[in-house]
Each structure stands twice: as C-alpha cells, then as structure tokens.
Image (spheres, rainbow, N blue to C red):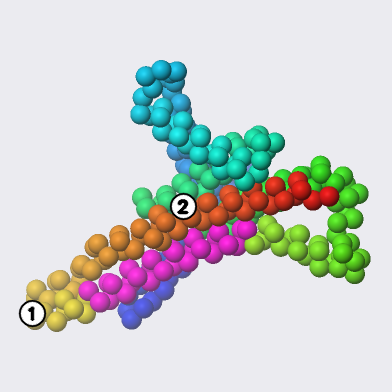
Amino acid sequence: MELDINGARIFFTLPIDLPVLGQLKISETMIISWIVMILITGLCIWLTHDLKEENISKRQAVAELLVEQANKFVIGNMGEKFRYMIPFVAALFATSVVSNLISLVGLRSPTSDLSTEAAWAVVVFIMITAQKIKTSGFGGYLKGFTQPIPVMTPFNILSELATPVSMACRHFGNILSGVVINGLIYGALAVASSALLGLIPGLVGDVLSQIPVLDVGVPAILSVYFDWFSGIMQAFIFCMLTVMYIANAAEEG
C-alpha cells in the first residue's frame, strides 16, 4: 500500500502471496512466523544446553530466571492447579514478543497481520470453552447462556464470541497502529529534511535536499516506545487476558 504525503511516498508492506506449494499458499506472514519459531527454538536450546547443579553459568542463570518468572506469572494469577499451563503461556509470550520486535531488523512483523492474532485467539477461546465444560459439564455450559434469564441467551452468545474477536483486534490494532505511525513519521521527517536543506542555494542544496537527514536518530528514539515498549506490553496484555479468562472459566459453576 502506498501513501503520498506532500510528494513523499510511504510504503506499508502487506501480505504477499508467494508461489503455491501444492494446495498450500505460502505467505510472507507464514515464512516470518517460522523464522520466529526457529529463533525461539534456537534460543531455548542455547539457554538450556549443558545445565549444571553447581557453579552455573550466566546463561543458565538467565534461563532459570525466565522459568521462575513464568512460574510466578501463571501460578500467581491462576493457582497451583494450572501449573501445566506454564509452557503454553511462556511460549505464547515469547512468540508474541519476538514477532512484535522482529520488525526492528527490517522484517515485517507477523502480528501486523490479523490472521496471526486471530489464530492465537481461537486457540485460547477453545481452551476457555474446554475449561468451562470441564468445570460445569456440557449441560451446565449450555445452561450458562440462559443466565440470568432465558431472554439473555442471544446476548450471552454474542458476548462469548466477542472474547476471541476482542483479544485478536486489540493486539493487532496496537501493533498495526505503531507501524502506520512510524511510517507517517518517516515520511514527515523526509519532507521536513527536503524542505530545510532545499533552502541551501545552489547544487549543494539540490543534492542535500534528496538526503533524508532528519530520518536518522529521531525514528530510532520513537521506536523505543512503538517497537520495544508497546510490543512487549501487548504481549504481556494478551497473556494476562489468556490466564485470567481461563482462570475465571474454572471458577464458573
């Protein structure tokens, strides 16, 4: 997609369908998602290689710290009985963070594609529903839609379906907005740089006005928020909603 601002062209990368592999279409989002998973897998293998009980390395200390924080996060918010959820929540958080931050190296973030968050949200929704059925039974789960009065059934169904939609759109919207805002900032700074340096008379001004000098430094400072802080925060919020929804489902009935 191309956006024109006072003559400055800004490009936003959209999903690009690559050649079809059999009946499967390979998109840019899928390829980068696999890169993200390979990076996380490689990091896990490196952190957990050659573990020791005594005289541990700094690498092992970092690994133990990450595991400890994951334990505290899940057990602290869900209780001891949900200890089995720790690997899932940790993997979800790591995937979200790396996907959000991979744009820093020039790759398109998979989380700027709604299909990524939608897939995550559907998986979480299935887990929430399974927990509700496990807690109340299938009959109790269906009966819950008629509470507090049967006439509320359609609204309760809509509310149930709204859960994955809100989780996906919240994460996607915040990541995409950061991409768009960064693009607009780059474009605005390029225009400002061209206008300021174009005031220099002669050939020097003509040459320098073609160089987006102001694009150096300022966007990097802004990326501390839009890429680092916002990316990590959105991953944390998505995981927090996941554990809270599942924990609440276990308390119903």
At label 2, counting other C-alpha atoms closer than 10 Å, the crowd grade (few under 14, some 14-19, many 20 or more) is some
Start-end of magenta stretch? 167-193
Disc 1 vs disc 2: which is toward the camera? 2
The residue closer to the viewer here, 195 or 227, is 227
At label 1, counting other C-alpha atoms closer than 10 Å, the crowd grade (few under 14, some 14-19, many 20 or more) is few
The residue closer to the viewer here, 30 or 193, is 193
- Residue 245 percent location from the top left of the image: 69, 52
Residue 206 magenta: no
| Marks 1 and 2, how far apart at CA | 47 Å
Where residue 214 sits, quadrant-wise, is: bottom left
What residue is shown with label 1? 202
Where residue 198 sits, quadrant-wise, is: bottom left
Residue drawn at (38%, 22%), measured in percent from left and top? Answer: 56
Residue drawn at (41%, 74%), measured in percent from left and top? Answer: 3
Q: Earlier in the sequence, mark 1 or mark 2?
A: 1
- Residue 155 percent location from the top left of the image: 81, 68
